[in-house]
Amino acid sequence: MADTKQPNAIQKFVQAVIRPAKEELLFDKFDESITPNMRALRLAVNVADTLIAMGVSVADVVSQSLDITDRYCTRKVQIDISSTLITISQDRGDAREPLTIIRHAQPRTVNYMTVQSIQELVRSIRHGMNLDDAEKAFDTIITKPVKYPYWLTICGSGLISAGVGVLYGAQPIILAIMFTVAAFVSYFLRLLVHHRIPTFFAQIFASILIVLIAAVVRKIDDSNSVAWIQDVNPSLIVIGGIVMLVAGLTVVSAVQDAIDEFYVTANARLLKVAMLTIGIVAGVLTGMYFAKKMGVYIPTQSRFVIAASDWQYIGAFLISAGYALSMQTRWVGIFVAGLIGIVAWHTYNFTLDVGGALATIVASAIGATAAGVAATLISRVSRTPSVGLMMAGIITLVPGIALYNGLFALVSGGYDDFSTLLEAGFVALAIASGVGFGHLIARPLNRTLVRARNALPRRTAPPTSN
């Protein structure tokens, strides 16, 4: 008689877990059989990840990601970016499940040459590059980025501070000290970030270091122990350091996101800018407090004398070009950034001559607008991201002196007088709004110029004779 005994629960579990080898071959792993459609989505999210982490505005990132999916995907794709969270989804109808990729943008060191290379890649994709070549080109851009030596970008940070000294007619010895201090602090700041110190605390420590170095220079000057350090104004050292630290804030992208109605990302970026600015303020106040307790007094001036006309424009050029160099911009872009800095500074001075109680705020806004317009129109020709040129152009307008004077008055006991700090805040807001407005009004004109250039008849090579 045949055995009709049924398998118990344990036997059923073992049979369900331990599958025959033949049955396992019926299933393919996802990463071994990825479709071209999914590869296109993955390329789009990788591009968005890189651009968002480097401070590009959300509208530009979404536009370039959609250019990729429109070229390679037959169905439309939805892209949503909320702060650092990137979501790309494709609805493939009722018969097939949707495809969705979610990515958290990882922090990266800003490299505008990488940003420009990606933008050129997306442009080639629009013009017909196949998917295989696009993936290989993107991998090359990310794994083998074009970048300057580390010491050269640090020198760029030093040029920002030295340019501030040239702008205000500092002596050569002060310029050398400002350059050295800014370069050292830039190295110190990157060292802290490399060791995973939060950027907020890194800003505090860097600001404290700047003020303490200025206090030491003041102490040496008072003691007459070093012959070549005489009549040094340490206030300029602090102001140059403040401008150098503020230069790294992505306020332009934050304002662009707010104008383009990407409010979640705009709020996140503005909050980051606010926190890092608070870190600078806290560090400067702490450094001034320590210097005061040590008996070292850093003098303050309500106004600094602007250098002669030629020298102040040289200073504006050095500030903007130094920022472009520190952010890994191509050599042509560095020169163009310096010229945009001159345009912003000249517009600011021209408007300031009108006078009035709101002259500084209005002049800052109009100067930033000029920088935004110039950067947007020249970015395509100079093969440099517009966000990099705009940031470089407005660095010359940063209210470093007003912020320094307000902080000095605060640490000296003037707690009831916040007018200087309030003015610095309004000037910063005017600069951010002005550059965003300039980009907004120049963007349609830039598209018109590009379409007009593309419509021109192209030259064809003459036929070769046999």
Image (cartoon, grey):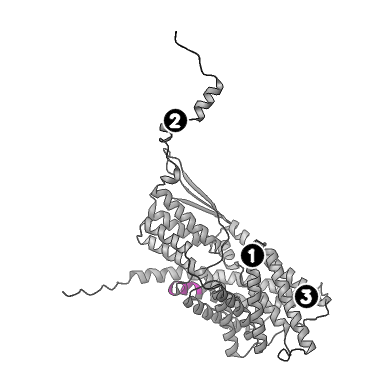
User: Helix, strand, or loop for circle 1?
Assistant: helix
Q: Which residue is mark 1?
A: 193
Q: Earlier in the sequence, mark 2 or mark 3?
A: 2
Q: Earlier in the sequence, mark 1 or mark 3?
A: 1
The answer to which quarter of the image holds residue 315 is bottom right
Task: Using residue 159 as the reference point, say whether residue 130 is left or right of it.
Answer: left
Of the pair 341 and 442, the residue shown nearer to us:
341
Residue drawn at x 71%, y 72% is 207
The answer for how far apart the CA atoms under marks 2 and 1 are is 52 Å
- Where is residue 355? Give x, y as percent: 65, 83
The answer for how far apart the CA atoms under marks 1 and 3 are is 24 Å
| Circle 2/circle 1 CB separation < 8 Å | no
Q: Amino acid at mark 2?
A: Pro
Most extreme residue toward the left, as rendered?
466
User: Helix, strand, or loop for circle 3?
Assistant: helix
Q: Amino acid at mark 3?
A: Met
- In the rendered image, which quarter contains the N terminus? top left
Residue drawn at x 60%, y 69% is 433
User: Helix, strand, or loop for circle 2?
Assistant: loop
Magenta part mainly helix, strand or loop?
Answer: helix
Which contiguous range is marked in magenta?
375-381
Q: Given this view, does label 2 or label 1 mark the residue nearer the observer?
A: 2
Is 376 included in the stretch rendered in magenta? yes
Is 220 placed above or below 411 here?
below
Q: Amino acid at mark 1?
A: Val
Q: Earlier in the sequence, mark 2 or mark 1?
A: 2
- Where is residue 197? Give x, y as percent: 67, 62
Q: Which residue is mark 2?
A: 20
Q: Which residue is mark 3?
A: 288
